[in-house]
Amino acid sequence: MPAEMELDPDNVSAKSSPSARVVIPGDPVPEIPPSDVVILGPGLRREGPHAIVTRPGVLRHKPLPSSAEKLAPKAIYWVDTHAKRYVAARGEHVIGVILAKAGDTFRVDIGTSEPASLSFMAFEGATKKNRPNALPGDVVYAKLLVASRDMEPELVCVDAYGKKAGMGVLSGGGFVFTTPLHVIRKLLSPDCVLLKTLGDSIPFEIAVGMNGRIWVRCKSVKETISLANAISVAEYMNNDEIKAMSAKLVNALAGF
Amino acid sequence: MPVKDKALELRPLFAQLGLLGHTDGSVMFSLGQTAVICGVYGPAEVKPHKERLEGATVEISLRPPSGPTGLQEKAKEAVLKGLVESSILGSLHPRTSVFVSLQPLDMDGGELAAAVNATCLALMDCSISMRCLFASVEVTRTEDGIILLDPSQKQATKAVAKATFVFESVNQDVLASHLEGRWSEKAFQAGLQAALDGSKAIFQFYRETVKRKFSKELMMK
């Protein structure tokens, strides 16, 4: 599986805390004392000394290992929210569709408010003469190198060593579909057994983009479609339900 | 001021979140028999001539249940635009647009209030960063000074004056008000107080709606 496991605070296994509760914008967060050094993640902001919720969702927190440093943060707080629209964040892997060639770059739609740019030179082994053979309409799995609210997002298809590391044009058929962003976070969470369980019985290749797009390819079209459906319906399932659903799906595919 | 207790109750509230597949956030909201569907797109692509470098561009489209869009709709759009601009954290998404589309289905009094409340719920379903929530209630006054909270069209036939207030959730301040007819200061204060009490019920309804949406999530982990 070329899918990269993202390690951002949303995915680091959030063990349930007794304080997990539903919050709405404007709510104060009294758990965060004004004097404490904490990291405020998505959905929270500081207003004077107090932390205020800005997005509706489930408030979560994770204590950080204590450090000798005096100003080291003690915990991370964030709001687990449901959204469909992607806002680019640096370092995240996304799936994009090439819209056009513009000079030495591709314009790539990644579901944000403006298309991202992807340089011809940001592919493995690319040189000025040896250009990547990607065409408008192709699907690429890439990483966000620049993502700032004031600038155009910029993608690369190579890692820091110049290797493709699973990224690049997604070829050989396959199927792209979209899910809400929280489904992606769930799928990539180390706690989630969905891909592991399905992979035990059905060989498949998958690329999961943080922008809500999933590319999946199996041996047959039938398997690809069932896999895509299985991922879409897993949104509200817990691990036991996922295992039961996967077993049923594998049986159905085998013709039982 | 003679104020009947029963007159100060809201009609039943109903909301269904996320019913439109193509939008980023959507809701069907009803206030008694008044129903409206609202869809939100954002932060989305913005036309170059509407682009703002300091924040998101807010666009509202409100259509009447039938017939062409008139001045009344335009006036409501202007009110809603101001409300959305003041409650979302637009500066987090410069050079983008937040597009709100409203389609009233049934009109039975309190149309503006229903549109405002639907907009707030749809923005929450879309998960746009917001500074505060907002809720709106309509009140009317009859000739003999009886204040009615959130009346239906039939109940409001005897009304000589009408007012719609919008409150924000953090400090319970008035964000917008729209008055029709003559309001004495005393009646105005009574109406404002009735609307403020009504808005608290709406904020509580918002919280319950969001709780319902995330109930599965809470159980899972």
Image: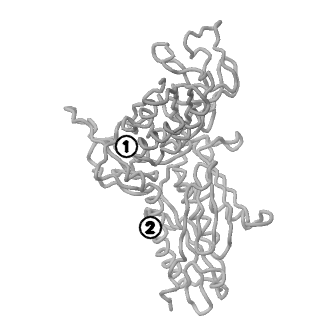
Disc 1 residue type (three-letter):
Leu
Where residue A61 sits in the image (x, y, percent)?
32, 45
- Disc 2 crowd rating (10 Å Cα; few below 14, some 14-19, many 20+) is few
Q: Chain of mark 1?
A: A
* Whole-percent x, y for residue A118 in the image: 60, 22
In the rendering, at what x and y percent does residue B123 appear? 55, 54
Q: Amino acid at mark 2?
A: Gln
- Badge 2 element: helix
Badge 1 density bin: few <14, some 14–19, many ≥20, Cα 10 Å: some
Residue under the point 44% across and 40% down: A186
A246 relative position to A141: left or right: left
Depth check: A120 or A214 in front?
A214
The numbered dot on residue B204 is 2
Going by the image, does A248 lie left or right of A109? left
Badge 1 marks a residue whose secondary structure is strand
Residue holding disc 1: A40
- With respect to residue B176, does A51 lie above or below? above
Q: Nearer the viewer, mark 1 or mark 2?
A: 2
- Residue at the extreme front: A256
The tag on residue B198 is none
Residue at (47% x, 24% y) in the render:
A1
Tell me the chain of label 2: B
Count of labels in the image = 2
